[in-house]
Amino acid sequence: MVDLFRPGPYVPTSTEPRHRFHRLEMSSTAPIGPIAIVGAGALGTALAQGLSANGRQVEAVVSRNEEGARALANRVGASVAGATGAVLPAPVRVVLICVPDDAIEDVAEALGHCDHPWGDTVVAHTSGAKKAAALDPLAQQGALTMSFHPVQTFTEETSPEAFEGIVVGLEGHDRALATGEALADLLGARPLRLTPEEKVRYHCAAALASNGLVALLAVVEEVFGELEGNSASVSGAGLVAPLVEHTWSNLETGRPEEVLTGPVMRGDTGTVQAHLDALESETPHLVPLYAALSTEMVRLAVRGGHLSVDRAETLLAALRTATDADLDSERSSPLSR
């Protein structure tokens, strides 16, 4: 039987870092050669503008949308723009590939057929989930490859300041990573070295933090939407914004098990059951989500010393009963709601 109260394979002490990866703070003196951006979308635009704002000239912009490439090149003063890698100036020594994940291998393959001194060039893609191995066609041409993933959301109007203080996940060839660290430092970001095995887990954590939060607040909207007294002009997310902000403030200075509050932390089985009953009545498809999140809260509460194992087991039994009942019943698809 899995012990739900175990914190997992590793829990840092109060004197240890909160991550299991390599150290965040690194100062690199690796030289950064002339830069080209491949992909003129939101991230490519943000990177080009961030580098330019921090004194690093972007020499070329390449995009399958040549008009977009020229527009971005004009914004950052790049002298070359085009739709294929054939326009890459020979002096370019850093190529940042900012394209959708599914296009990375094809772009790498196409660039590998271009006449360029790849043996003297660092090439990075900006995917969070893909590894540096996605650039193997270029590595076979001698390029030093890596993944360079800023942990941030971007639009084409994102300001260069968006890189300040964020983490940039780096994975790949050691010599390429030195350049990646220098680029991150230049942007005001914090480089984080990852092994290939850590890469997907790192991206999963980032997706849960950002996209998972959006989905959770959408659930809040749905639950609040069932309240007759809720004004349509006030969103559920808006109603809980001060609560979320205060919780985040607490998390900046304390660990999750230290700042957890609420009925699960107190072992208030009656309130938890009332929540389950309310969801079962109005939004039954949300019962499994509530149970899953509450199970994690139980684990946190036990780890934080707030909840005895006996009271935790009582709560878990109620949560299991609710999810078992949900599985036994016939429900319409959540997508139909």
Image: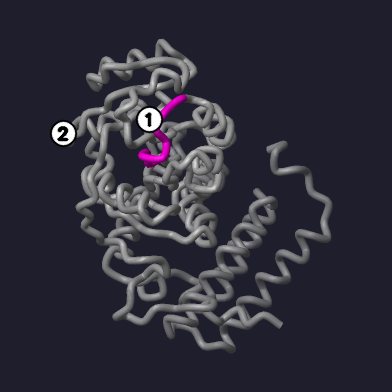
**Region rendered in magenta:** 115-122
Q: In the drawing, what numbered circle is on residue 55?
A: 2
Type of the residue with mark 1: Gly
Residue 53, placed above or below residue 248: above
Q: In the drawing, what numbered circle is on residue 132?
A: none
Give the image location of residue 301, x and y in percent.
47, 78
Which residue is drawn at the image coordinates 36% and 82% (left, top)?
A: 13
Which one is nearer the viewer's eye here, 61 or 50? 61
Which residue is drawn at the image coordinates 40% and 70% (left, top)?
A: 256
Type of the residue with mark 2: Gly
Q: Is residue 186 visible?
A: yes
58 left or right of 239 in image: left
Which one is nearer the viewer's eye here, 102 or 244? 102
Q: In the drawing, what numbered circle is on residue 44?
A: 1
Residue 81, placed above or below residue 299: above
Question: Spatial distance from mark 2 to mark 1, Cα to Cα?
Answer: 17 Å
